[in-house]
Structure formats: structure tokens, C-alpha cells
Image: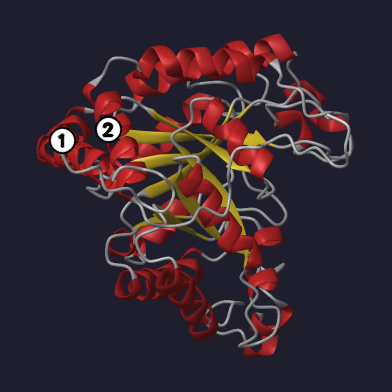
């Protein structure tokens, strides 16, 4: 009998071929099974918003049971001057998401100074639409097929997020439509998500998000996104707080957005909640929004059932946020699933248990595991990230 043929690394080619042959047959079944499972998957899919693109944050996202991670790609960092591109951070985020089997959702905003138009030359909005379209198209071409979705801007109903100009639904819609065309031309399979709007009753530097969404739809925005982005915060109140709360600031405010969509005949629109949270740290006039760590965990877990029952069109919810080391004065710190030292809070642990029970044993779970196994078996890529190994330096063990 001829000896087995071996690769240089000592792996038997015949043995590997047998495994590949088995997986080929399995893959044929997997394609149909995965398609059926996604079509039948009516779960509210979990995602989490990262504030920094680090290996630890992506690893914690995967370990926490999240299927996707949202990562900001600040335009001002990626293209600080016109035509000068810095890809280190976004390249890392893409590879880390792939390594940890997370769908990557990229948010595209934070413009560089050179792309912000002066008030005297800002007709049509403060952001140069040609420059932004070039930016999003360049990102989408570079990561074609590797990014699950792109979120076009963030909270444009706040002046703070709109280059300190008055919120302008028609101006944002024009930017959204330019971005939609640019992204689809570069990566037709990518999902385009409209900016999540800040829940607010208006006031200086802010426009009520319900009024803003109405203005967007009046300007034709429905043709310029695949999924409507929405921000949902509890504002210190439990998830089942009634819709007629005195100031309307609670989780049920989501249903007001649904009413706006229905008014425009767009009630079948797919919706992603791109920020969802309760804060454990609030002070001054916002102190009423603060909840305990135990309440934060309870409210986040209960919000999953509330959202699924109240608005079935919501397909995915992004917990805001997963971060560590933020200063105490930073308003984002109280929403984090980790404490300042990076230790998981009760919300992280209880959500992980919730997601595991929601996912385990489903066809979607089976198909996802098989896809991961197939990709790892057949991949010829060399991963940038790998599991940690103990390295001994010197003679001592």
C-alpha cells in the first residue's frame, strides 16, 4: 500500500480531501437550510454598538451573544484631508468582525473640516454632498461583501450632529439619497440604513424626531434607504411604561415613528433600532433618567419582548453601548454594559443568557454554525487575529 501523501505541515491530503468532500455535500444542504432559516427567523436579532475598535471589545461582543456589531468609521479620521486615506482602524474592524463571526454594521459620519461648507456656501446642507458620496463609495468599494450594512449619519435632527446648523430634513434626505446611490453602486449587496434620530421634544438646536421623519418622507427619503434607523431610550422608565407618558419620553415613543410611517403609507418598512439603552449615571437636570445596574439589566431584557410584540417590523436592536475606561463625566459611560474597569455589568450577563436561550436549537443557529465551520475549513486566508498563546522568554518555564 502506498504511504499517505502529506502536506509540508504534516496534514494528510487524503484525509483533508475526505473532510472537504463531506462538507461539499453538507454545504449543498446548508445553502437551502440557511435561506429557509433566515426567512423563518422572526427573532429580534441582537447587536451592540462599540465605541472603540479593539480586539477585546469585538471578543466581548461575540461572547455576549451578539450577532452584529456597530462600529463608527469617523470620516475625519479616515480621510483627514481630501484624498488622504488612513485605513488602519477600519481594516482592523473588518478583520476583527470576520474573525469573531460578527456581522459588521458601519456608521459613516463625523465629517472633516474640509468637507463642511460655510453658511454662505451651504445651500442644500452643511456637508459637501460630492465629498461625502465619494467617501462612502470608497469605503463600500474597499469592503465590498465584508460589511453587513452602512448607517448614513447620526441624529441629524440635532444641530450638534449637523455641523451646528439648524436641523433640515430635506437637506439630510438629499445627503442620504446621494449616499444610497454611491453605496449601492459600489456594493449592491450592502444594506443602507437611515440615520437614527434622537428622541426629543424639540427646543434650541433640536427638532422633534417625529416631525423630522415626516419631513424626510415628504422629501422622498423612502426611496433612499433599505432600513429605517431608530433610536430608542427608556429615559429612566420601564419598557412597558405607557405611550401617553406626560412628556412622551420612554420606549413607547417608538410607536410614534410607526404612526408617521403609516401616515405616509410606509408601514411595511423594515426597522432597525440602532441605539437602545438605559443609563446608570445621570446628574443635574437629567438625574431622573438614572436607573440602578439591576434595573438596567431588567429593563434591557424586558425591552426585547416589548419591541417584538409592539412593532414586529423591527428586525434588529443595537444595545448602546459596549465600552470601558470612559471618564465618569462622559454621558456615554452610564449606558455601557461594562464598568469603568472593564468588568461586565449585570446587563451584559443577563442579556447573554437571554440571547443564548432565544437562539439555541433554531435552524438559524444550526445554519450559522455550519457556515462558520465550512468557512474555516475551506479558507486559505491567513488571519490577522488569532487566539492568545503563552510565550516564554528566556530559560525559565
Of tags 2 and 1, the one toward the viewer is: 1
Report if residue 397 is visible in the image.
yes
Location of residue 10 by image quarter: top left
Sequence-earlier tag: 2 or 1: 1
Residue 67, above or below 65: below
Q: On the picture, is 132 further left or further right than 378? A: right
The image quarter containing residue 37 is top left
The answer to whether residue 208 of the structure is visible from this angle is: no
Residue situated in front as seen by the camera: 336 or 380 = 380
The residue under the point 34% across, 74% down is 186
Q: Nearer the viewer, residue 101 or 214?
A: 101
Q: Residues within 10 Å of mark 2 (few under 14, many from 20)?
A: some
Nearest to the observer: residue 217 or residue 82? 82
Q: Residue 76 in the image: state x and y as whole percent.
A: 69, 72
Q: What residue is drawn where x is 60% and y is 29%?
A: 249
Q: Which residue is the site of mark 2?
A: 370
Classify 318 as above or below 379: above
* Residue depicted at 47% across the width and 50% down the height: 105
Question: Which mark is drawn over residue 22?
Answer: 1
Q: Hey, which quadrant is residue 189 in on the image? A: bottom left
Amino acid at each position: 500500500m502506498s504511504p499517505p501523501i502529506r502536506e509540508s505541515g504534516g496534514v494528510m491530503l487524503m484525509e483533508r480531501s475526505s473532510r472537504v468532500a463531506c462538507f461539499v455535500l453538507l454545504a449543498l444542504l446548508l445553502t437551502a437550510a440557511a435561506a429557509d432559516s433566515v426567512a423563518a427567523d422572526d427573532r429580534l436579532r441582537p447587536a451592540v454598538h462599540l465605541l472603540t475598535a479593539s480586539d477585546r471589545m469585538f471578543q466581548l461582543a461575540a461572547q455576549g451573544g451578539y450577532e452584529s456589531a456597530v462600529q463608527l468609521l469617523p470620516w475625519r479620521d479616515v480621510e483627514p484631508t481630501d484624498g488622504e486615506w488612513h485605513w488602519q482602524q477600519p481594516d482592523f474592524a473588518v478583520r476583527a468582525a470576520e474573525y469573531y463571526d460578527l456581522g459588521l454594521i458601519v456608521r459613516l459620519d463625523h465629517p472633516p473640516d474640509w468637507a463642511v461648507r460655510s453658511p454662505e456656501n451651504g445651500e442644500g446642507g452643511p456637508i459637501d454632498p460630492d465629498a461625502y458620496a465619494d467617501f462612502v463609495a470608497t469605503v463600500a468599494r474597499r469592503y465590498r461583501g465584508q460589511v453587513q450594512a452602512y448607517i448614513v449619519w447620526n441624529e441629524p435632527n440635532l444641530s450638534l450632529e449637523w455641523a451646528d446648523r439648524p436641523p433640515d430634513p430635506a437637506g439630510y434626505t438629499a445627503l442620504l439619497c446621494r449616499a444610497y446611490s454611491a453605496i449601492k453602486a459600489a456594493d449592491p449587496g450592502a444594506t443602507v440604513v437611515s440615520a437614527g434620530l434622537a428622541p426629543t421634544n424639540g427646543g434650541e438646536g433640536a427638532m422633534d424626531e417625529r416631525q423630522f421623519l415626516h419631513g424626510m418622507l415628504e422629501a422622498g427619503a423612502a426611496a433612499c434607504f433599505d432600513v429605517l434607523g431608530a433610536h430608542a431610550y427608556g429615559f429612566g422608565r420601564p419598557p412597558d411604561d405607557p405611550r401617553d407618558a406626560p412628556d412622551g419620553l420612554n420606549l413607547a415613543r417608538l410607536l410614534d415613528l410607526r404612526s408617521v410611517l403609516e401616515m405616509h403609507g410606509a408601514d411595511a418598512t423594515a426597522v432597525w433600532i440602532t441605539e437602545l439603552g438605559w443609563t446608570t449615571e445621570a446628574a443635574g437636570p437629567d438625574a431622573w433618567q438614572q436607573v440602578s445596574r439591576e434595573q438596567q439589566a431588567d429593563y434591557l431584557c424586558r425591552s426585547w419582548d416589548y419591541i417584538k410584540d409592539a412593532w414586529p417590523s423591527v428586525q434588529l436592536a443595537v444595545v448602546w453601548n459596549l465600552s470601558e475606561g470612559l471618564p465618569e463625566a462622559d454621558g456615554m459611560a452610564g449606558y455601557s454594559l461594562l464598568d469603568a474597569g472593564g468588568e461586565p455589568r449585570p446587563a451584559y450577563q443577563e442579556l447573554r443568557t437571554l440571547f443564548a436561550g432565544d437562539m439555541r436549537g433554531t435552524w438559524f443557529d444550526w445554519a450559522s454554525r455550519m457556515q462558520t465551520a465550512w468557512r474555516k475549513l475551506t479558507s486559505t486566508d491567513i488571519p490577522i487575529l488569532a487566539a492568545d498563546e503563552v510565550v516564554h522568554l528566556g530559560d525559565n518555564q
